[in-house]
Amino acid sequence: MKYSIVVPFFNEQESIHEFYRTLSAAMQKISDDCEFVFVDDGSKDSSFDILQEIAEHDERVVIVRLRRNYGKTEALVAGFEHVSGEYVIAMDGDLQHNPEEIALFVQKFNEGFDVVCGCRVKRPGDNVLLKRIPSRIANWMMRKLTRVEIHDFGGGYKGYRTQLIRKIPLYGELQRFIPALAVAYGATICEVPIHIAERRHGKSHYGIGRAIPVFFDLITIPFLLRYVSRPMYFFGSFGMVALAAGSAIGLTLSALSLLFGVHVMQNHGPLMFFGAVLILGGLQLVGLGLLGEMQVRHFHQRADAFRESAVLRVVKRRE
């Protein structure tokens, strides 16, 4: 198997049949060596029944059903864990992504790239003030903070080398930061232009409320890229600076008291307390770094155990 298409669905019953038809037609032109991994992310409508019906007639279709709605990142990870292709392409199932453009991703894979990102060049229906301008600002900040020169982090139309994507720990809303996280594994990254169609059925699951979690992730990502496997380097550095400054203040005040008879509490009380706070804060930061080093050892094991429990059912067509 060479290509796996992973598509998360959440209450998309009106779109599934048409999406499946267009995807099948597109892949017939691109490659017969493919599979479709459809993830039902805890839909409350008839999405799973429709997907199950499709799987009964197409042996290329694999359905992963989650116990509840975990969100897009966890749905994608569940799909990635059940692919068998050498390359995996993630896209949305709401008919806004054009399956014909998969050929662009395949071309870049053949050129040797590990990650191919779809860059949205046309986004009809997006509000300029609420979506386009905030999106441009966020993408600019992501480029600066992550040092990954792509122009569209937020788009869900992306392709990955399967061996690579399975190594990257994902949770929360980190699916939009996969290109940045992939850099830590030496991945080669490129962009291809894609066009977004207007949503025809249902309503968007994204709103302005997603901006706050994305902002927090934007702060987290630079830390993950530089210190995820060595938290002591981050916390310990600040801790040692605080300890050094606090110790310097303490030694200076001690010298003034012993050599010149200065009443430290009366003349330099605030400075003395500030030095004590620096010393205590420095010790806490060093201790936090040590705790972080201990937690790093167990992080991946806990994440893997959680995702295994999240999958309720996997449906494959019987041969």
Image (tube, rainbow, N blue to C red):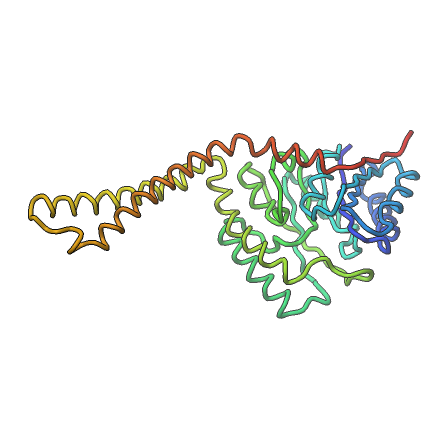
Q: Position of residue 142 (x, y in %)?
A: 54, 54
In this rendering, would 232 be left or right of 312?
left
In this rendering, would 265 be left or right of 240?
left
- Quick one: quadrant of the N terminus? top right
**How many numbered discs sit on the rendered protein?**
0
In this rendering, would 207 be left or right of 236?
right
Please state which of residues 205 and 196 is positioned toward the viewer in this rendering.
205
- Quick one: quadrant of the C terminus? top right
Please state which of residues 108 and 75 is positioned toward the viewer in this rendering.
75
Please tell me which residue is depicted at 82% across the width and 51% down the height of the picture: 44
Please state which of residues 262 and 114 is positioned toward the viewer in this rendering.
262
Q: Position of residue 281 (x, y in %)?
A: 34, 45
> Looking at the image, is 209 positioned above or below residue 242?
below
Q: Quadrant of residue 163?
A: top right
Please tell me which residue is depicted at 75% across the width and 32% down the height of the picture: 84
Please tell me which residue is depicted at 49% across the width and 35% down the height of the picture: 229
Q: Position of residue 297 (x, y in %)?
A: 52, 30
Q: Position of residue 27 (x, y in %)?
A: 82, 44
